[in-house]
Image (spheres, rainbow, N blue to C red):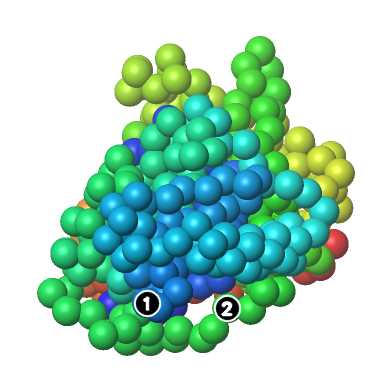
Amino acid sequence: MFVDRHDAGVRLAERLAGLVEEKPVVLGLPRGGVPVAFEVARGLGAPLDVIVVRKLGVPVQPELGFGAIGEGGVRVVNPAVVRVTGVTEKDMAIVEERERQEVQARARRFRPDRGPLDLAGRTVVIVDDGVATGGTARAACQVARAHGAARVVLAVPVGTPDVLARLRQDADEVICLETPSALWGIGVCYSDFTQTTDQQVVELLRRASDQLDVMVDVGPLRLPGRLVVPENAVGVVAFVHGSGSSRHSPRNRYVASVLNQAGLATFLFDLLTVDEEHDRLNVFDIEVLAGRLGRVTTWLADEPRVAGLPIGYFGASTGAAAALRAAAEPGNQVAAVVSRGGRPDLAGPCLPAVRAATLLIVGGRDESVLDLNRWARQRLRCENRLEIVPDATHLFVEPGALEIVAGLARDWFTDRLPAG
């Protein structure tokens, strides 16, 4: 069902895109849930943390939980289970002490230099790599609620309908991508289910904290954006979204995550304000959009975290026209441009002046746009190439199509953005 946890997280993030406006907190269940949660947090532009919980198992039947505990002394007990099993206060105290020590030890390992995020009044998205019995996920929902979460959303790539139904007793909403009738183990749903280590959890939390939400001045306006800088970055790519999209585009975020893994910093930002988006004419004002991109490029060149790194543009649809129009400006130092399903024809008069190496990627079934890209390529004087993704349409929604786009963009940028 999934290539790996990265693939599952990206797909889950796309499904959860509607939560962006709620400004949620994303919590991953360690260890395997954290790589999935990392991609969800990136897709939602949300902070990421782990939720360290332990199920309190009945001594003679450990798989049956009489409650759960979490950080900060949070304790949830199910009186019905206590009553039915006859577990005593003494038995409960012994189990709780053992599990409390384990919670504290794990929390110190995963967050050696800080405490947990504050959940009070927030929408909390709890993520795991799948649910088999649902015991840990249920405990996590209960603990998040006890920490003051206003709304709890449980999001998993895979789970059976009966388990998901039980989990709806503890979560306000349950989101699941695949729901097989039977599930003998989470690992069988992944091609690569390599065990996640504690160190990888720590590293993912660190990387998540490296994501920086910023506001960039472009003349009288300020545009919001998110800068992600991997360790030892070799270049930075500005994403120029198309009509009807924004910095929250799940497709662009997926491509950005692939570039991040290859050591490239990425900057996704909004080209238009909320008010401007209501006028469709603004979407096609390529000169204005290119001017704003030019100012963003200047900002990137001066931003301390990426200053000195070579710059690339990744443009989609009308955003590709803005990217090529900006790249044609005298003095623009962008080194490489990638167009995904772009409209380079909208930058027609400027195409001969583009100096950056340009890759045009078009779906094989996107025939009208393919013709426009062939026309534009004849007018480019820079290094350029046209790549056609077979059987793909304009948005590359077909299975595997966006992965091909991301791989082509990664290779183009890593080959043409020399280390700064």
Q: Which residue is mark 2?
A: 196
Q: Quadrant of residue 190?
A: bottom left
Tell me which residue sits at (62%, 36%) in the image. 118
Looking at the rendered structure, the secondary structure element under dot 1 is strand
Tell me which residue sits at (26%, 68%) in the image. 159
Q: Identity of the amino acid at label 1?
A: Gln
Q: Quadrant of residue 10?
A: bottom left
State the count of labels: 2
Q: Which residue is mark 1?
A: 61
Q: Position of residue 138 (x, y in %)?
A: 37, 56
| Front-lying residue, 262 or 161 | 161
Q: Does residue 141 sit above or below 151 in this rendering?
A: below
Q: Is residue 148 left or right of residue 317?
A: right
Q: Quadrant of residue 90?
A: bottom right
Tell me which residue sits at (39%, 60%) in the image. 66
Q: Position of residue 128 (x, y in %)?
A: 43, 64
Q: Is residue 90 left or right of residue 137?
A: right
For the N terminus, the quadrant is: bottom left
Q: Position of residue 184 (x, y in %)?
A: 26, 85
Looking at the rendered structure, the secondary structure element under dot 2 is loop
Q: Position of residue 82 (x, y in %)?
A: 36, 57
| Front-lying residue, 83 or 406 | 83
Pick whichever of labels 1 and 2 is earlier in the sequence.
1
Tell me which residue sits at (50%, 57%) in the image. 89
Q: Is residue 261 visible?
A: yes
